[in-house]
Image (spheres, rainbow, N blue to C red):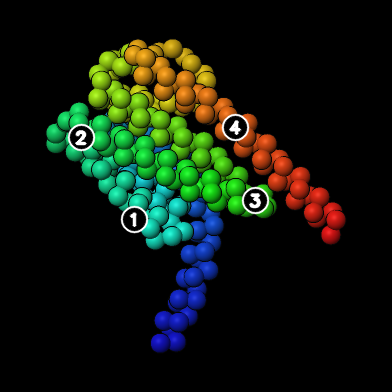
Amino acid sequence: MKGMQMDDQTCLPFTRWCFKRRFLALLLLILAMLIIVPLADEFVRLRMLMDIFWSALFIAVIYAVSQKKHHILVGVLLALPMLGSIWSRYFMQYSALEAVGGLCGAAFFIFAIIQILIFVYTQKEVTRDLIAGAAIVYLLMALAWSFIFGAVESLNPGSFSIPDIEGISISRSFLYYSFVTITTLGYGDITPVTSLARSLCILEAVIGQLYLVVQVAWLVGVHVSQSMLKKSE
């Protein structure tokens, strides 16, 4: 019994240490997915690697927003259809299934964004975890929009003009396009064709830029008030 109590006492601080750094771990995972998968494709052509990263990412996001049990339940319910549509591609392909999976994936990331923003805006001190959480929200926005674009293309094929590049799937093309759009780079290799697709692209660009302005202003304000409070003490 004593040995078990000691193990619980040692595991609890380690669990808290991991949970405090959940946003940093999630940030590194997203960056790894964006870097490692293209590099691996140049040498290995491992098609399953991207799907493995997606699965790991969904698990990491659920852990990041697992402050309450019902958050985990909602996250799992939204993640399962998306994971099902991802892995079912190896056996069958249905546009309806991909559309439902894409919408559930977008809803999953939107839910995670809301929970992380609640955490961020309730903090009164600027910490590394807070900055990582703010950065994660921006990246999750791009991921959510990539699923929305995929769902639109599945429901209405031809909504986007996408170059046919060997070895590049549609989902990865939309992942690339979403990051290009939210950062307003606009390379022009992928273009929206329908009115709905164009409106969604405008919305993503506007939301992304507004978020950066508001978030930076808020972080600076919190930091300034934090510094003034420390000086007054």
Using the image, determine if residue 196 lies above or below residue 37. above
- Name the front one of labels 4 and 3: 4
Left or right of 22 on screen, residue 227 = right
Give the image location of residue 127, x and y in percent. 64, 51
Image quadrant in which you'd find residue 52: top left
Label drawn at residue 73: 1
Give the image location of residue 38, x and y in percent. 38, 29
Q: Identify which amino acid the numbered label 2 is placed on.
A: Leu
Give the image location of residue 162, x and y in percent. 32, 15
Q: Indicate the secondary structure of the residue bearing disc 1.
A: helix
Give the image location of residue 155, x and y in percent. 24, 25
Residues at marks 2 and 4, CA–CA distance in whole angstroms: 34 Å
**Mark positioned earlier in the residue sequence (1 or 3):** 1
Q: What residue does disc 3 label?
A: 127
**Mark positioned earlier in the residue sequence (2 or 1):** 1
Residues at marks 2 and 3, CA–CA distance in whole angstroms: 41 Å
Q: What residue does disc 2 label?
A: 97
Label drawn at residue 134: none
Q: What residue does disc 4 label?
A: 212
Can see residue 48?
Answer: no
